[in-house]
Image (spheres, rainbow, N blue to C red):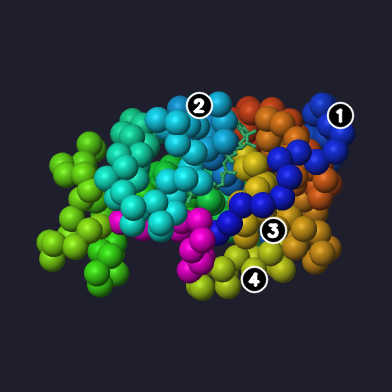
């Protein structure tokens, strides 16, 4: 996983209007295979700070400074304090109308896959079945000695940094900057990028790879790209339709219109 690209991409497209929703729904109505990608923005309305939003800093650290193997080697306690803070917020959060609308979409397509960059587990809690957590899950941990995985649900943590029964450190089972996405998750993702008719990209700043490159992949394969975000991103240029606003408002609206059109 690595960051790159520009934060912004050219002149702001026109604000969303009814015609844009209509265009998106029209395309979805004719699609057989839907791929959805989400980022931290989908969970913002559940009260979870995004990484690059103004509330994303923790004790003046950016995610890129903490979510790295070298930060963990240097100071595992600081890295774990950050995760303990996020886990405390997430434990109190509930899936919001955006998560629930994506769960509804899953039931409306013969072929459906959700790739989420989020590690908060809120999509799973919405009841979704076809999901790849491409950056892992912050409730899972693994032993740094033998790599064995387990769940660690304590909030707050009983010891920081937490340790395995064998005495070695535990680390969050998430993909950090500079680390590779697990091979199977990547293989299934690329299969879906090739097969989908429509890609719906929700609430990601589009600066963290490999996911940032997925919209261009789909365009290259002849697919249609719909973006939902509060603001323009590097993905906006590749998108066929950009819907600017809160995902918790726009996604339920899409589901409602799609149901009417069927
Ligand atoms: P970012 O924090 O970079 O971006 C969040 C995006 O959501 C921004 O583009 C916001 O404009 C948008 N947004 C905010 N509220 C929204 C709302 N209510 N509706 C729609 N959009 C909204 O988060 P990601 O792109 O997910 O990795 O970041 C990618 C990765 O970087 C994360 O998975 C994380 C981080 O380091 C790990 O922790 C492993």
Residue denoted by label 2: 55
Q: Of the numbered discs in the image, which one, if any, rests on residue 214?
A: 3
Q: Of marks 3 and 1, which one's residue comes earlier in the chain? A: 1
Q: Name the residue beneath numbered marker 4.
A: 191
Viewer-nearest residue: 215 or 51: 51
Mark nearer the viewer, 2 or 3: 2
Say which label, 2 or 1, has the lower sequence index: 1
72 part of magenta stretch: no
Q: Earlier in the sequence, mark 3 or mark 4?
A: 4
Q: Disc 3 and disc 1: Cα gap in Å? A: 23 Å
Magenta range is 171-182
What residue is at 31 percent from the left and 49 percent from the top? 75
Asked whether residue 57 is in view, the answer is: yes
As for residue 175 lying within the magenta part, the answer is: yes
Few, some or many residues within 10 Å of mark 2 (<14, 14–19, 20+): few
| Location of ligand 1 given as a quarter of the image | top right
Q: Would residue 15 appear left or right of 133 to someone viewing this image?
A: right
Secondary structure mainly formed by the magenta segment: loop
Tell me the distance, in whole angstroms, between the alpha carbons under discs 2 and 3: 27 Å
Does 93 sit left or right of 214 as displayed?
Answer: left
Q: Which residue is mark 1?
A: 14
Q: Position of residue 84 (x, y in %)?
A: 30, 39
Residue 2 appears at what percent x and percent y?
Answer: 58, 56
Vertical placement of residue 33 versus 124, above or below: below
Q: Position of residue 242 (x, y in %)?
A: 78, 38
Whether tag 2 and tag 3 are in contact, CB under 8 A, the answer is no
């Amino acid at each position: 996983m690595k960051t790159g690209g520009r934060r912004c991409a050219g002149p702001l497209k026109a604000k969303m209007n009814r015609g844009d929703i209509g265009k998106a729904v029209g395309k979805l109505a004719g699609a057989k295979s839907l791929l959805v990608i989400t980022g931290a923005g989908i969970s913002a309305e559940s009260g979870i700070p995004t990484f690059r939003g103004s509330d994303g800093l923790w004790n003046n650290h950016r995610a890129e400074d903490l979510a790295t193997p070298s930060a963990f080697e240097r100071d595992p306690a600081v890295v774990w304090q950050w995760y303990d803070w996020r886990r405390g917020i997430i434990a109190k959060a509930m899936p919001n109308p955006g998560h629930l609308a994506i769960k509804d979409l899953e039931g409306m397509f013969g072929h459906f896959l959700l790739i989420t960059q989020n590690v908060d587990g809120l999509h799973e809690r919405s009841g979704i079945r076809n999901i790849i957590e491409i950056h892992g899950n912050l409730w899972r941990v693994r032993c740094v000695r033998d790599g064995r995985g387990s769940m660690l649900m304590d909030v707050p943590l009983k010891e920081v940094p937490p340790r395995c029964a064998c005495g070695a450190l535990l680390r969050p089972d998430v993909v950090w900057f500079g680390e590779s996405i697990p091979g199977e998750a990547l293989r299934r993702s690329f299969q879906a990028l090739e097969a989908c008719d429509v890609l719906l990209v929700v609430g990601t700043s589009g600066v963290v790879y490999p996911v940032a490159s997925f919209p261009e992949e789909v365009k290259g394969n002849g697919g249609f790209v719909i973006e939902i975000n509060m603001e323009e991103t590097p993905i906006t240029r590749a998108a066929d339709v950009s819907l600017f606003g809160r995902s918790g408002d726009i996604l339920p609206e899409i589901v409602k219109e799609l149901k009417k059109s069927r």
